Amino acid sequence: MNAIGQPSSQPGHNIEGGFDVERIRQDFPILSRQIHGKPLVYFDSGASAQKPRAVIDAMTEVLENQYTNVHRGAHYLSQTLTDRYEGVRETIARFINAPSENQIVITRNTTEAINLVAATYGRKFLGKGDGVLVSAMEHHANIVPWQMLRDEKGIELKVAPIDDAGVLDLDAYAALLDGNTKLVAITHCSNVLGTMLPAAEIVGLAHERGIPVLLDGSQAVVHGTVDVQALDADFYVFTGHKLYGPNAIGVLYGKAELLAQMPPYQGGGDMIATVTFEKTTYQEPPYRFEAGTPPIVEAIGLGAAIDYVSAIGMEAIAAHERLLLAYATERLMALPDIQLFGTAPEKAAILSFIQQGIHPFDTAATLDRAGVAVRVGQHCAEPLMARLGVDGTVRASLAMYNTTYEIDTMIKALERARTLFG
Amino acid sequence: MTIAAENLAQYNEYVEALDMLDEESRFEYIIDIGKRADKVPFPADCMDDAHLMHGCMSKVWIIHTREDDRHKFQGASDAIIVKGLVSMMTGSFSGLTSAELASVSLDHVRGLNLGALTMQRQVGMMAMLKHMQKLSLQAARAEAAD
């Protein structure tokens, strides 16, 4: 076991806090490849996580042996794959402790899930002058759909502020709930700062005023256990590809009574009950919101990803990531030139920073030369960058397969960047 | 359109220099060019929206001037590597005629052999080239309208 401050001296000896990270790394084929002649250090999981063999194999197996379209196919392949596809809905429901799989809507990604809520719930229940409350640290995916609704319906977009550490100002949030606020749409974990928001408290304060809450769980669902019933979330959205699953599949959870009242999102096959040229009737949720052939293979992949992380245990993953975060924070702050953004007491293993006097792009390019993959720029959160007073940051987003040794590699590359650009 | 060899002297110099270097050295070579670019200061008042090439990861400004039918460019960026890349582009293709500039293509960018750098930067250099070509065309149109 590596205590904080005692980095592993070499790869292959990273059983950290009882978490056998080396065994887990062996499940991810890409982690054995080299970049620019150096072992890949993948610190961009916040953008998209790598895929374990279990996900790759599950998707390949469907394509090779089971593939067909799902729903209403009167043949063996369709019936068996439909069972498997619908089984994933149950897997997702269990994963976030949803009361029923019928409250799990399959989307393309988080962005589509939020757009779906804006276009259905928003269009039906929000009108001129009604407020939608977001935070100052939202991803564009939880800003722009509401701005589009603002332009269409005349709603007001309200923004709850954060402090310099990246913590939501709960008093200001509570004050903003009063008046015209009719919906809260807020991140559960900042994709830039790593801040874990007090979701249950946020929901509780809103519910005291009868206001429903949508939680953007894109990052949060990856870093710990999510229980939508304990949170009492009205909507909870996340994406598959950050959760070690494939891209092009996302999830919208909604309370049954809300989903039942919402009109369809898109029209087409699968979402209808009956169609004549005069009149069409729609399916019940979740199918009402799933027009067209769904992402079948991707759903199987997401199911495999959830099974994979569940077998390891979200609490064990969270504990390992806490160790990584503490170690990375300590090593970064020991460098003389690092400005770290996001120092909330409750945060996920996401580190946004700049090297003083060095452009983030130059830092990231130097890290890339060392095989360290990070993200640079505004991370789809331009308003947050404006709040922080920077044009962009370097973001290292860690995952269950990362090690303290890899953090050491990043630190060495940052020292080289100082030599090259300082 | 064939570009006169003497008009591509700087470009050819870059190609030859980069050709002799390994990946890591190319990376440091670009940084050196970026650092040396400051020897010809970019006018501070041109670091404005009018001269900005919009990009996500770093800012790039390009000034275009014209003498007779020769186009001249000067570039800057807030990132040193990007400053190196834009300096290579503006240095390589300054002094070309309108017709020559229009015939500069992706092949020329590929000819710099910056495969060691990421696709993003390759695409970035193509975007720089297209921006330079657009600036020259805009200048020609503005002149024709006068």
Image (cartoon, coloured by chain):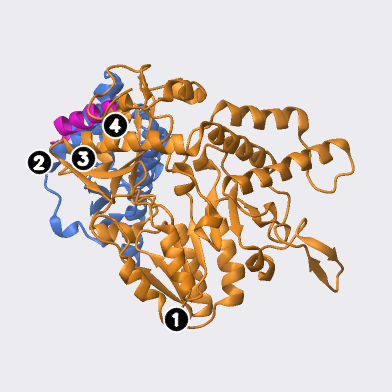
Chain colours: A orange, B blue
The earlier-in-sequence mark between 3 and 2 is: 2
Tag 4's secondary structure? helix
Residue at (42%, 39%) from the top-left corner?
A318
Quadrant location of the N terminus of chain B?
A: top left
> Are dots 4 and 3 on a single chain?
no
Task: Indicate the amino acid at tag 3.
Answer: Ile
Magenta segment boundaries in residue numbering: A408-422
Residue at (87%, 68%) from the top-left corner?
A276
Between circles 1 and 3, the one closer to the viewer is 1
Which chain hosts label 2? B
Instruction: State which quadrant residue A282 falls in.
Output: bottom right
What residue sits right under mark 2 in the picture? B39
In the displayed structure image, the side of residue A116 where residue A362 appears, left or right: left
Badge number at residue A180: 1
Label 4 close to label 1 by CB (< 8 Å): no
What residue sits right under mark 3 in the picture? B80
Residue at (49%, 75%) from the top-left corner?
A151
Q: Is residue A238 magenta?
A: no
Between circles 4 and 1, the one closer to the viewer is 1
In the displayed structure image, the side of residue B74 where residue A317 appears, left or right: right
> Are dots 4 and 2 on a single chain?
no
Badge number at residue A367: 4
Q: Is residue A412 magenta?
A: yes
